Image (cartoon, helix red, strand yellow):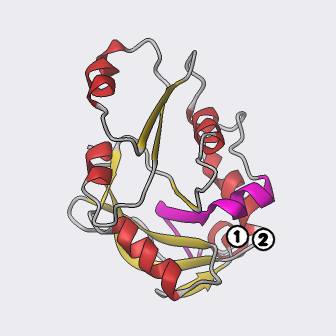
Amino acid sequence: RAVTSLLNQTYKDWELIIINDSPTDNSYEPFVTSINDPRIHYHVNDINKGVNFSRNYGLSKLSADSKWVVFLDDDDYLAPDALSTFHNLILLNPKEKWFLTNRAKVNGEPLTRFPKSDSTYRYAFDYLITKRCKGDATHCIETKLITHSKATFSNYVKQGEEWFFFYQIGLNTKIYYHDHNSTITDG
């Protein structure tokens, strides 16, 4: 479902890097043999190493011309206009380096709560400290921002692991929030 949601995007210029962290699970074989889109790159960890290792590994596999990164877990999927929404936000706000939209339930209820749409926020202050901004979200981050900040996911943290990654990025820029349900989740 996650991969199909990428294939069904209205914006077509994307690259998908899949990291399989279940190397002994043979149930993925039919899926792997069905991949015939050159935009999809499939990698398998040699042993189960966890989500943080897999995210870092995926970042290391980005194409040299990659300009933006959106993370998508396998139990979520993108709304058909998610990438076009980010593309339009990038064109309308060329100075911004980090965009954030909603992660929402299937019924449309957003899990993301920010005070105002089309505004900027500080990750550490507004999200971590004062909690003015809450909830899981869909992040679209300029690739250069990730590489220049040398941000990585910690291999030692198992809960809230993304907080450290986003904190590293947040030291160099603010978040631009736009109220749009980009990622859909069952959970």
| Residue name at image x 23 percent, y 58 percent | 106
- Residue 20 in view here: no
Q: Quarter of the image holding residue 128? A: bottom right
Q: Is residue 144 magenta?
A: yes
What is the x, y in percent for residue 144? 70, 62
Q: Is residue 100 magenta?
A: no
Q: Which mark is first along the chain, 2 or 1? A: 1
What is the x, y in percent for residue 133? 55, 74
| Residue name at image x 40 percent, y 60 percent | 13
| Residue name at image x 43 percent, y 44 percent | 73
Give the side of residue 136 with respect to residue 159, left or right: left
Residue 120 versus residue 37: which sits nearer the camera? Answer: 37
User: Residues at badges 1 and 2 in contact (C-beta under 8 Å)?
Assistant: no
Residue type, mark 1 in image: Ile
From this view, report whether residue 4 is shown above or below residue 155.
below
Q: Quarter of the image holding residue 12? A: bottom left
- The 10 Å Cα crowd at callout 1, few under 14, some 14 to 19, many 20 or more, is few
- Between disc 1 and disc 2, the foreground one is 2
Q: Which residues are magenta?
A: 132-150
- Residue 172 — which label? 2
Residue carrying label 1: 129
